[in-house]
Each structure stands twice: as C-alpha cells, then as structure tokens.
Amino acid sequence: DSGMESGFGSDFGSGGGGGGKLDPGLIMEQVKVQIAVANAQELLQRMTDKCFRKCIGKPGGSLDNSEQKCIAMCMDRYMDSWNTVSRAYNSRLQRERANM
C-alpha cells in the first residue's frame, strides 16, 4: 500500500521534465479546452431542454414526422443564434483588448 504512494509520488514529480516548473501557457491552454468542453456540454443541455419542451407535446415511444422536423429546425436556429452571439462576443473582446 505504501509502495504505491511512493510510486505515484515519483511519477508525479518527474512528469514535468522541466525541472519541476509548470508551464503557465500550457496550463492556460488546458483550462481553455476544459472551459470550451463545459460550454459545449451546457449548450447541448440547454438546446435539448428548450427544443424538447417546444416540440414534444406528449412524449411517447417515438418521434413523429412533425416532431422530428420541429427538433431539427429548433436545433439549427439555436446553433445559428449561439454562433452569432459567440462571434459578437469574441469581436468585442478583441476590440477591448486592442484598446487596453
């Protein structure tokens, strides 16, 4: 049991390979990736929630044709609006960075 802990400790210590220093740039990239994944999951969750409520009046064993079309349209519109908001937000961030 104690052998496992010491093994983990030495693995962890030598993992960096840069004399034990962590690269802030690398950490920031990993954080950005994790935030992007969390945002995508939240987007999917919200989209599913909203489109389900909007399109499916009485949940049953399968979707009929109109429900399938409604969900497809709803998700398309949701993605379009989300992309529009993202672009606006990103260009605003860039403008503000340029003015700093």
Image (cartoon, helix red, strand yellow):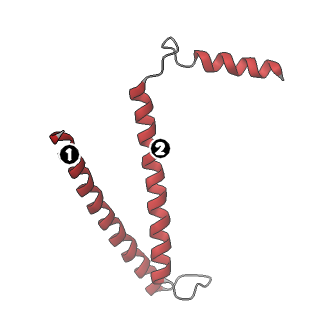
Find residue 96 and name its label.
1
Closer to the eye: label 1 or 2: 1
* Quadrant of res 89: bottom left
- Compared to 31, does 18 lie above or below? above
Where residue 82 appears, as percent x and y from the top left, is 33, 63
Where residue 73 appears, as percent x and y from the top left, is 36, 76
Determine the CA span between mark 1 and mark 2.
24 Å
Residue drawn at x 36%, y 69% is 78
> In this rendering, would 76 be left or right of 51?
left
Residue for badge 2 = 34
- The amino acid on which the numbered mark 1 sits, given as a three-letter code, is Glu
Residue drawn at x 50%, y 86% is 64
* Quadrant of res 85: bottom left
Task: Check disc 2: other Cα within 10 Å, few if <14, some if 14-19, many if 20+.
Answer: few
The answer to which of 17 and 93 lies nearer the viewer is 93
Q: Secondary structure at mark 1?
A: helix
